Image (spheres, rainbow, N blue to C red):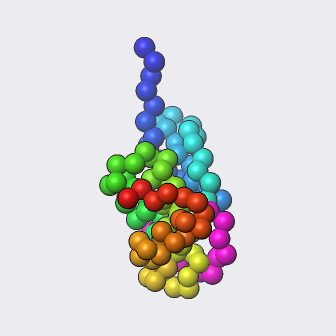
Amino acid sequence: MERQRRITSVSTCTIDERLKDADDEVQRIVPAFKVEVRDTPGAGDAFTAGLAFGLAADVPLTEAVRFGCLTAARAVTIRESVPGVGTLPEIYTLAKKHGFEVPL
């Protein structure tokens, strides 16, 4: 019987996101968006919010992680963490610029 693998962690890196299984093996690497960085506080929180949004939208895990990358990319393009997270319309604008379809 073939063993099914579950993704058990998502590691945030500066250039990509890594999805690991229970054996700590990297299963997927999701590339980050290339943007001009102005300020980094709040990027991890923005990524987590985007990931949660994608999971709540019931999209595949890789797409949820990609949306997390997108929200983190938006966060680092703005000075200061609170306005950096952005509204959905602002995230949609960045998504359109990068050719990424938002899960909702």
Q: Position of residue 37 (x, y in %)?
A: 64, 76
Q: Position of residue 6 (x, y in %)?
A: 43, 36
Q: Nearer the viewer, residue 98 or 62?
A: 98
Residue 63 in the image: above or below residue 72: above
Quarter of the view holding residue 16:
bottom right
Q: Is residue 70 magenta?
A: no
Residue at x 44%, y 22% (from the top left corner):
3
Q: Position of residue 62 (x, y in %)?
A: 49, 47
Residue at x 32%, y 55% (from the top left corner):
56
Residue found farthest to the bottom? 79
Residue at x 49%, y 54% (from the top left corner):
65
User: What secondary structure is the magenta-colored segment mainly?
Assistant: loop
Q: Position of residue 103 (x, y in %)?
A: 42, 56
Quarter of the view holding residue 97:
bottom right
Q: Which residues are magenta?
A: 33-45
Residue at x 56%, y 85% (from the top left corner):
79
Residue found farthest to the left? 56
